[in-house]
Image (spheres, rainbow, N blue to C red):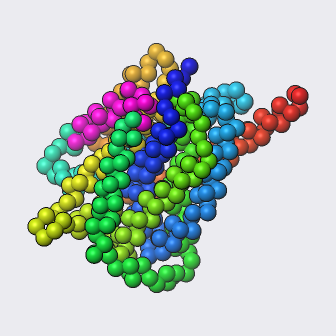
Amino acid sequence: MDQKVIQALHIYVLIIMNTGFMVHVLLLPNILSASQRDGWISVIISVVPCIVWTLFIFYIYKKLDKEDIISFLKKWSTPFVTYIFTIAFGLYFIINAFITVKFTLIWAKANYTHDIPNIVVVSLFTFICIFASYKGIRTISTLALLFLPIVTILGIFVGLGNTSNKNYELLFPIFESGYRHTLNGMLYTSAGYLEIIVFLFLTPYLKNKLKAKWLLLVGIILMMLTLGPLMGAMAEFGSVEAVKMRNPAYEQWKLLRFGYYITRLDFLSIFQWLSGAMIRISLCLFIGYKLISNSKHQKWILLSLYLLIVIGTLIHWDATSFFNFIYKYFFPISSLFLFSAAIILLFIIFKKGKGKGETL
């Protein structure tokens, strides 16, 4: 039986740290590639789908009645459907963790760890994530709660500090190439909001209840985490250069200076990046190994998953091909998967309600 060790606040913070890292770091260059100068319009238009999706997932949460997805399926679906969901979501979380580790390694090698062997960088970083995953959801959520205020202050600092470097006229004209780019950008923007469904795997650990208004606030915060650095990158570098950048949010740190003599404050971004990546990786693998493990071998399965990710990260995969894979395959497929999973869950919920009605 799962222990109820976290509060609703922890869930909200975990969503912000986990999905916030994805939209702020992983998703941003893809939105720019898909929609170019109209990227910020794509984000604004996506507010309505985000609100609808959040309310939709909250409805599913209420119907699950504090059960996680897999436990619900074991009661109300066939063993085959439960098995498919377990394997599919297990792979989803493991792949997400791998993508985050690989992306972090590419960023670190390009900026700070040129002369350090990859195995040292990956091993040291994943060791911290292993510790968090092993200690459990309470430790992960507590770390997220500690990290979020610092990450927020640093984000506000870089945003306000670069005000003099921004020219918002570079955001215009919009729809220069029609509406196609805007619609393409909406597909990638929505990929970030679809991840809100992840909290349904954490409800068995929850002491109290989630509220729709706070989940909607979380959705708005995620939109701001996408819109702020996206507009900032185009206002500071122009849309043409911003599209070429692999880490537009990080590049903004390189422009920041404090007074006349203090420059190169981008070292502050290291904490931002690594704290978000650590929460995302440890949370994904915590959920992943809970899905595929049994009570006797949980520790070994967790270690094996991390070892698999370390080995996969160390295999040579050039940055260009990796980013093309994320853009063309990972985000479109993961978005389709999450949306389809939610629709299937809704169908089973309706079927459950109908079955109860017939029984009565």
Name above or below for residue 347 compared with residue 294.
Answer: below
Number of marks in the rendered image:
0
Identity of the residue drawn at 31% across and 72% down: 163
Residue 15, x across and y down, in percent: 48, 45
**Span colored in magenta:** 121-141
Q: Residue furthest top?
A: 296
- Pick the quarter of the image with the C terminus: top right
Name above or below for residue 283 compared with residue 106.
Answer: above
Name above or below for residue 255 compared with residue 82.
Answer: below
Magenta: predominant secondary structure element?
Answer: helix
- Pick the quarter of the image with the N terminus: top right
Residue 272 visible in the current orientation: yes
Question: Foreground: 77 or 167?
Answer: 167
Residue 206, x across and y down, in percent: 54, 32
Q: Residue furthest left?
A: 261
Question: Foreground: 329 or 201?
Answer: 201
Residue 53, x across and y down, in percent: 62, 53
Question: Foreground: 80 or 342?
Answer: 342
Identity of the residue drawn at 70% across and 26% down: 75
Where on the picture, by quarter, is residue 356?
A: top right
267 relative position to 183: left or right: left
Identity of the residue drawn at 40% across and 70% down: 231
Residue 96 visible in the current orientation: no
Residue 286, x across and y down, in percent: 44, 32
211 relative position to 256: left or right: right
200 relative position to 279: left or right: right
Where on the picture, by quarter, is residue 190?
A: bottom right
Identity of the residue drawn at 57% across and 45% down: 197
On whether residue 133 falls in the magenta region, the answer is: yes
